[in-house]
Image: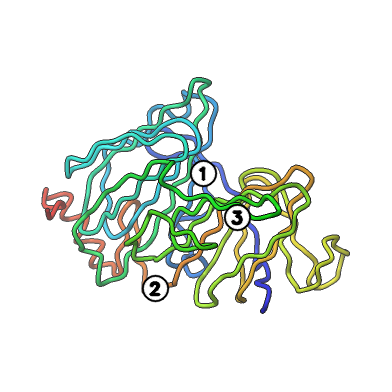
Amino acid sequence: MSIRPVKRTVRAQPTLEGAGVHLRRAFGFGETSETDPFLLLDDFRNDVPADYLKGFPWHPHRGIETITYVLAGEVEHGDSMGNQGTIGAGDIQWMTAGSGIIHQEMPRGDAHGHMHGFQLWGNLPSSLKMTTPHYQEVKSEEIPEVTADDGTRVRVVAGKFWGASGPVDGLAAEPVYLDVSIAPGTRKTFQVDTSRNAFAYVFAGDGRFANASDPTPVPTDGVVGEPTLVDNRTLVLFDTGDEVTVQAGEEGMRFLFVSGKPLREPVAWHGPIVMNTQEELRQAFQDLDRGTFLKT
């Protein structure tokens, strides 16, 4: 077994999206090789309704899949295929944009005005860029949660983990998407297929990800392999290996842990549309201008 060392960490950056939604972007609209097949991860966490209620009005997508995971508040969805629905705390929605869809996502806070969720974009391979659009919701009670003897809790959103299978399937990226909660001071190791890219996004507490097999949790300055300390709103990109080891800090730790098989295909990307070539990208925007964007 080999530890996946931390390649680098990134602090999620304040970003304004939609009609004026204040959020934090962990990655997106940049180099995609380190996160392939994933393109973007947004953390839309806010306690000020004026900073999120204008939401994400009607806009197009082509060539991608989106997974929205809500922890607090609600998100209303509507799209050009006639789908409508609302997801709340613990719920999931995913959408395969494929050949083209126009949709809106409108967030609402809970009774205290708190809104929190994540949106992850998965790329579609060239063979599926123009597939038929698809939308589905999953309620919180349908998402399995497994608990280890040491109190570690894992909600399995997608993929297989510790004998449980997540309800989000059929995604081209074949993701393993986990919501992990680790008790204070607990050290835990997670297996990762060596063929996959993997990242963690910490959104509560702090901890240290190991960079070597040495179990010593306390780093020594200048020593190669010392653990990497990470905290709230930090993206952790991992190098190669078949396991990730983390030790939670004094307040415990909660993070998304996501892996997927890289497509290793060219990416032509502008705004909400992701294709393989600039010509395909130009065609998509011509379709928008001519009113021929929707194929189904």
Coordinates of residue 138 in the picture (x, y in percent): 36, 45
Residue nearest the viewer, comparing 269 with 97: 97
Furthest residue in direction front, as rendered: 149
| Secondary structure at numbered mark 3 | strand
149 vs 249, left or right, is left
Disc 1 marks a residue whose amino acid type is Asp
In primary-sequence order, the first of circles 2 and 3 is 3
Where is residue 29 shown, x and y percent of the image?
A: 44, 56
Dot 2 lies on which element?
A: loop
Q: Is residue 288 above or below residue 228?
A: above
Expressed as whole percent of the image width and height from the top left, the position of residue 243 reads 63, 71
Q: How far apart, in angstroms, are the residues tagged by discs 1 and 3?
A: 11 Å
Q: Amino acid at mark 3?
A: Leu
User: At label 2, which amino acid type do we have?
Assistant: Leu
| Above-or-below relation of 143 to 237 | above
C-alpha distance separating marks 2 and 1? 24 Å
Q: Residue at x 44, y 44 (%)?
A: 69
> Marks 2/3: CA distance?
21 Å
